[in-house]
Image (cartoon, rainbow, N blue to C red):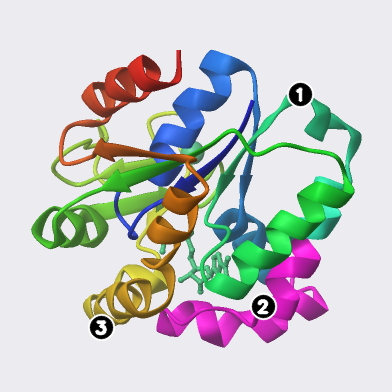
Amino acid sequence: MQIVLLGPPGAGKGTQAKSLKSYFNLIHISTGDLLRKAVSENTKLGVEAKEFIERGDLVPDKLVIELINERLSKPDVSRGFILDGFPRNDSQADILDKMLQKKNIILNYVVYLEASEEIIIQRLSGRRVCRSCHENFHVKNMPTKVEGICDICGGELYRRSDDQEEAIRNRLKIYTEKTESLVDYYSSQEKLLKIDANFDAPVVFEKLKSVLL
Ligand code: ADP
Ligand code: ZN
């Protein structure tokens, strides 16, 4: 099974990807995670991408495509995958189609997670991430036992620089301008599955399973 997760920031793509990954034994490819890793490791690509990520802008296609191409060339891809955060504009979608064609891989579904702006802002502004294991928490929806400390590994929690209000607003604007049109793109390929993601994560996952099984 090869799936793309589509939807605004804060729709829960990363959270649902993790559940899908373990339930269907797929690999999870998140461009956001790959980019943040490159930034923290100070690679050449990471240094170039950093300012775009912090502002909430899209990183130039060339860099993201380089990351995706590299990842999709690894042998474990044959297990099936969830693409989270890619494609994010028309030309990325076009390039993905061509890349998959070349590798003889079929894209089965594009799951569109829909969430209201109110829910999105509430989720993103309360999100906290562990510095060590990268697990996501939420100050209200999913608080840790000890404030500021990861339940899983004891690491320190931080607020992503692009989860500050100004960057959130910019990400939403860019989503509307550049990414939302992919809903039509995949709908005309008859691949789109629309899910109402305005619910708690386990409820959304049940809905997801019921459309995929
Ligand atoms: P979210 O979906 O919540 O905005 P992500 O972790 O997927 O968060 O992405 C964080 C940032 O990484 C984006 O705001 C953008 O700067 C960059 N990014 C991720 N995927 C792409 C992509 N496909 N094209 C360009 N930039 C990307
Ligand atoms: Zn942790």
In magenta stretch: residue 60:
yes
Q: Main secondary structure of the magenta part?
A: helix
In the image, the residue with mark 2 has its CB under 8 Å from the nearest atom of ligand 1: yes
Crowding at label 1, few (<14), some or many (≥20) Cα neighbours within 10 Å? few
Which residue lies at the image location 13% right of the left edge and 43% below the top edge?
140
In the picture, the quarter occupied by the C terminus is top left
Q: Is residue 204 above or below residue 127?
A: above
Pair 3/1: label in front:
1
Given the image, on which type of amino acid does mark 2 rest?
A: Asp
Q: Mark 3 — residue?
A: 166
Which disc is residue 61 wearing? 2
Of residues 135 and 18, the one drawn nearer to the viewer in this rendering: 18
Which disc is residue 79 wearing? 1
Distance from the alpha carbon under mark 3 to that under mark 2? 23 Å
In the picture, the quarter occupied by the N terminus is top right
In the image, the residue with mark 1 has its CB under 8 Å from the nearest atom of ligand 1: no
Crowding at label 2, few (<14), some or many (≥20) Cα neighbours within 10 Å? some
Tell me which corner region of the image, top left, top right, bottom left or bottom right, holds residue 112: top left
Part of the protein shown in magenta: 41-67
Pair 3/2: label in front:
2
Secondary structure of the residue carrying tag 1 is helix
Asked if the residue under mark 2 is in contact with the one under mark 3, i.e. CB atoms within 8 Å, the reply is: no
Asked if residue 149 can be seen in this view, the reply is no
Given the image, on which type of amino acid does mark 1 rest?
A: Arg
Which residue lies at the image location 81% right of the left edge and 58% below the top edge?
69
Given the image, on which type of amino acid does mark 3 rest?
A: Glu
